[in-house]
Image (tube, rainbow, N blue to C red):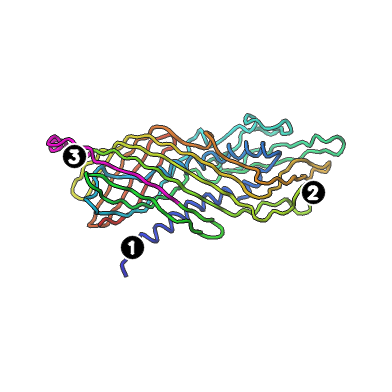
Amino acid sequence: MNLKPQLIKKAIIIVFFASFATMRASAQSDGISALFKGSPDDVNKLLNTYAAPLFKGFGNGLNGGWANTAKTQKFLRFAIRVSATGSIVPQSDKTYDVSKIGLSSRFSFPNGSIEPTFGGSTTAGPSIKYTDPTPVTGGSVSLPLPAGVVSIIPAPQVQLTIGLIKNTDLILRVIPDFQISKKIGSVGMFGVGFKHDIAQDFGTASNIIPFNLAIAVGYTHLNYKLPLDVKPDAGSTVIGSQDFTNQLLDGSFAGWNTQVIFSKKLLFFTPFVALGYLSSTTNVGLKGNYPFVTGATITGKPVYTSYADPINISGSTVSAGGGRADIGFQMSLSFFKLYGSYSFAQYQSFNAGIGLGF
């Protein structure tokens, strides 16, 4: 048995399982269900704010792992690698003030309004109060909001690099849609990038440059689908459709990354630094019918209204972008390679991976 390809295969499975188990923790936890309070407009505001670190971190991570050296592959030589990026949620994105996100006047905050985001404390914040404005029959109910889940957001990278002519690499990230598991969901990825060693374009001057110098650009697009099961409390009043089957989280994530890379090979060890710019976009929707708390009885029990396809998470709130700086290394042991790097950006991150080069 060839152990090296088996190692790559197992690494791919582990990376994808870890990444999308985190996504599932957001979508399937009691926390997300706890955000279905008020109108779809209110819930959109709650979800966009609470989940912002998850989607920013994931988009940031998709832009990682493109290159760990400025040196390009020889013509038609290739390398395959699998790596994972962990994006660190900054302190400023670990909490939010629920009283300042524009919720309707039905909400009040008698116990305080500072709540953890997805990347914040795993201890829940204060409950908020929802008051039904219906005369005589209307009441109020205390509603808990979700605690944080994790402050480091993982994202996967699996890519093939092929050497072309004139010191240029073609980089591909292609994963056909497949189901990781029924609980984790299904994923598909496409990405393409190029890296060009511009030091070799300087003619004889390249002989006196003590390092490799390259420019790189990459684009990644990832689709993710996850079946959901959000239902009202047993015995509750539900207005509208009570068919809560076929619920689905349908998400797409895209990212651009550009870099200038400096590296120097020292025997089997190649350190590098890079400067660049990244941007990411997120578009996540909930498909199907979902129960929303839209009222309360005089005994304090919630009243639900069913809405179809109610949620869309997108825009600058859940997108990452800006300058970045990377420092890291590539270690080559025959055709087996190890990679590692750390990135300084809006969301700082670290990346580690393994690969084979031929």
At which x and y percent is residue 302? 77, 44
Give the label on residue 200, or none: 3
Where is mark 1, residue-wise? 5
| As drawn, 275 above or below 222 | above
Q: Position of residue 331 (x, y in %)?
A: 26, 50
Which residue matches tag 2? 237
- Give, as a single range, the part of the protein colored magenta: 189-212
Using the numbered discs, state the Cα–Cα distance from disc 1 to disc 3 in whole angstroms.
Answer: 33 Å
In the rendered structure, which amino acid carries the disc numbered 2? Thr
Nearer to the camera, 227 or 355: 227
Disc on the earlier residue, 1 or 3: 1
Q: Residues within 10 Å of mark 3 (few under 14, many from 20)?
A: some
Q: Is residue 70 left or right of residue 142?
A: left
Point out residue 210 in the picture as x, y percentages from the top left corner.
Answer: 17, 37
Mark 1 neighbour class, 10 Å CA radius: few under 14, some 14 to 19, many 20 or more: few
Q: Are marks 2 and 1 in contact (CB under 8 Å)?
A: no
**What residue is rendered at 18% in x and 49% in y?**
267
The answer to whether 262 appears left or right of 346 in the picture is left
Is 282 displayed left or right of 352 in the figure?
right
Q: CA distance from mark 2 to mark 1?
A: 55 Å
Q: Quadrant of residue 112?
A: top right
Q: CA distance from mark 3 to mark 2?
A: 71 Å
**Amino acid bearing label 1:** Pro
